[in-house]
Amino acid sequence: MEKHHIELHNEKLQADHQRRFDFIVSEYAHVEEVISKLIKFQLAIPSWAIGTGGTRFGRFSIGGEPRNLEEKIYDIGLLHQLNRASGAISLHIPWDEINNSHAIKALAAHYDLHFDAMNSNTFQDQQGQVYSYKFGSLQHVNKAVRQQAIEHNIEVIHQGKALGSESLTIWLADGSCFPGQLNFRRAFQNTLESLQEIYAALPDNWKMFIEYKAFEPNFYSATVGDWGQSLLYANKLGAKAYTLVDLGHHLPNANIEQIVSLLLMEDKLGGFHFNDSRYGDDDLTAGCMKPYQLFLIFNELVEGMDAKGTDHATGLGWMIDASHNVKDPLEDLLQSVEAIMLAYTQALMVDRHALTIAQQENDVVRCQEILQHAFRTDVRAIVQEARLRKGGAAQPLALYREQQIRKKLINQRGSKTVAIGL
Ligand code: LRH
Ligand code: MN
Ligand code: MN
């Protein structure tokens, strides 16, 4: 998009924005401090989220979807140009094919993007692969299958190194569908030994994120099924291994904010896959179902990171993991980023001193009032101001529509594009 389109759009909305921003500044003393944090905060966009997703019942392409990694980078560059908060891309191998890492790195740099966590994939059989992952990968009863999965992960590290990534996210579909199918302890030990081999190949400045998930595709047991199991692996592996929390991977009603708080306390929280859900791993837009939960999670993150003096922007891996069946994926991602920025901002608005006193006095009503006051504060003008100062658009979604970006992408790439990946 041309720079002057953003400038024109911003000029049109400036007077209205200024009025709303002046109001919030008159209400709160520390708005500038909040803005300086928002300016640094970036979310990684998953390469697999910029095409239309699907369910096992069908997929309905929106058209104009990226046909290769170069076009995925272009799309994420566009998002970043609009909101200046999507400055990273998270790759999934082999869904993403890197033909020339030097050129890919340069292209990403051109759009001011860096490479966030690399994701390996041993939950599907890939073309030309010798052994099948039907009965698991790192847990497999056959050492040769485990070895194949280990080597894939090491290859992903090599590819990530060439791009300047500094972390590897491992999500395993390993587990069992029926009672008796698996010896739990043996599956755990096999997985641990496999992870140890991958960990040994991890560069010193890298982190390993172990993502847990309670169910799907296995429905009786998952070998990395919850944060307890992930933490066991991370602790046994060493200081570079962390737990990764995907918001859709819990059993119903799990208190994710408490999980996050304790993992942070233990220095074992590595990062997030943000999305929202009503039933399971729905991969819906962040904040679309349970915005209060998203706020409560950020409330714990801000509290915990401040207690440790951790830099909010760089302390954790901030990633989105979403899929889109009925929306334009780029619009959906703009909504997710906005929802996350809003929840983070609201968490920064919590009167933490007052909350600590209320907690000490067991004043339950006051505790709730303090949190809900922050949650109910309209912080949109603060997020918008931070975005404007970074050179982004006042209203990214509105500008995306004004500019008819999807139509332009369809004209360039065609209407029958099939997103690579899922
Ligand atoms: C598994 C998961 C994991 C995968 C992604 C595609 O449900 O959350 O992060 O890599 O989806
Ligand atoms: Mn995930
Ligand atoms: Mn998932």
Image (cartoon, rainbow, N blue to C red):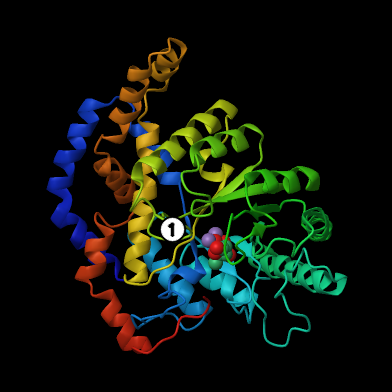
Q: Is residue 121 visible?
A: yes
Say which quarter of the image contains residue 324: bottom left
State the residue at coordinates (63%, 82%).
99
State the residue at coordinates (40%, 80%).
59
Say which quarter of the image contains residue 403: bottom left
Q: Amino acid at mark 1?
A: Ser
In front of the other: 32 or 28: 28
Instruction: Name, please, the residue furthest toward the front.
Output: 179
In front of the other: 397 or 131: 131
Beta carbon of the mark 1 residue lies under 8 A of ligand 2: no
State the residue at coordinates (29%, 66%).
3
User: Is disc 1 placed on a helix, strand or loop?
Assistant: loop
Q: Residues within 10 Å of mark 1 (few under 14, many from 20)?
A: many
For mark 1, what is the residue?
A: 86
Please state if 238 lies on the left or on the right of 366 as rendered.
right
Q: Position of residue 250 (x, y in %)?
A: 53, 50
Ligand 1 positioned in quadrant: bottom right
Q: Position of residue 134 (x, y in %)?
A: 70, 75
Say which quarter of the image contains residue 415: bottom left
Taking 236 as reference, is 150 above or below it?
A: below
Quadrant containing the N terminus is bottom left
Q: Is residue 115 visible?
A: no
Q: Position of residue 212 (x, y in %)?
A: 62, 53
